[in-house]
Amino acid sequence: SPERLNLDARGLTVCPVLGGEERLRLLNYQNNKISCMSNLHGLPSLIFLDLYNNNIQQITSLEPVPSLRVLMLGKNRIQQISRLEVLSRLDVLDLHSNQIRSVEGLSHLSELRVLNISGNQLHALDGLQGLRSL
C-alpha cells in the first residue's frame, strides 16, 4: 500500500530520499546499518517511524515530520535524548537498549503515553515532569 513502506533488513547505511510519498504513514527502516536520521522531508502524513536496530548515535532531522505519533529507536547507539521539541503529537517513544545516561528533553511531550527507556545506563529517573499522559 502507498501508505506503508517496509525497508527492513536491506543493508541500508543511510535513509534514502523518498519522493512522491505524500500519503506515506508508516516507514520501517528496522535492522539496517543507518547511522544518521535524514531525508524525512516530503512525508507530511508520516505518523510511524521505525528505526529499531540501526547504528544511530543522535536524534536529528525530525523537523519535517511534526505529525509523527510513534518513534521507534530501540537498539541503537543514542547517548542523549534531544531534538524532540517539534514532535508535540508524539504518543509512543521507544528508546530501549541505547546508551542514554539521563532522561531529558521530554517535558514538552504532553501527549506521550508510552515511553520505553529500559536497557540504558540511567542513573536516575528525573526529567519526566510535564508528561501528563504517561
Image (cartoon, rainbow, N blue to C red):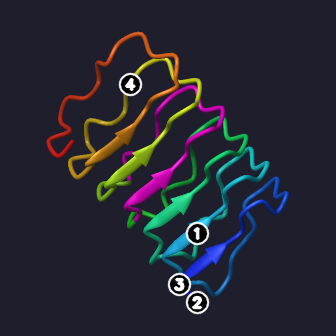
- Asked whether the beta carbons under mark 1 and mark 3 sit within 8 Å of each other, the answer is no
Which residue is denoted by mark 2 in the rendering?
A: 1
Q: How far across and down, in percent of the image, does residue 99 sit?
A: 59, 24
Q: Quadrant of the C terminus?
A: top left
Q: Position of residue 80 (x, y in %)?
A: 52, 28
* Mark positioned earlier in the residue sequence (3 or 4): 3
Which residue is outermost to the left? 132
Report the residue marked by disc 1. Answer: 27
Task: Give the total number of marks visible in the rendering.
Answer: 4
The answer to which image quadrant residue 74 occupies is: top right
To which residue does mark 4 refer? Answer: 103
Query: Could you tell whether 84 is left or right of 111 in the image?
Result: right
Residue of label 3: 3
- Is residue 76 in the magenta section? yes
Mark 2 touches mark 3? (CB < 8 Å): yes
Quadrant showing the N terminus: bottom right
Whole-number angstrom distance, CA of label 1 to CA of label 4? 26 Å
Element under label 3? loop
* Nearest to N terminus: mark 4 or mark 2: 2
Three-letter amino acid code at the position of disc 2: Ser
Q: CA distance from mark 3 to mark 4?
A: 33 Å
Q: Which residues are magenta?
A: 68-86
User: Mark 1 or mark 4, which has the lower sequence index?
Assistant: 1
Element type where label 4 sits in the image: loop
Task: Name the main secondary structure of what is drawn in magenta.
Answer: loop
**At x 26% / y 42%, what residue is drawn?**
108
Q: Position of residue 131 (x, y in %)?
A: 20, 39
- Lateral position of residue 26 relative to residue 70, left or right: right
Looking at the picture, how far across and down is residue 97, in whole percent? Answer: 57, 31
Q: Residues within 10 Å of mark 3 (few under 14, many from 20)?
A: few
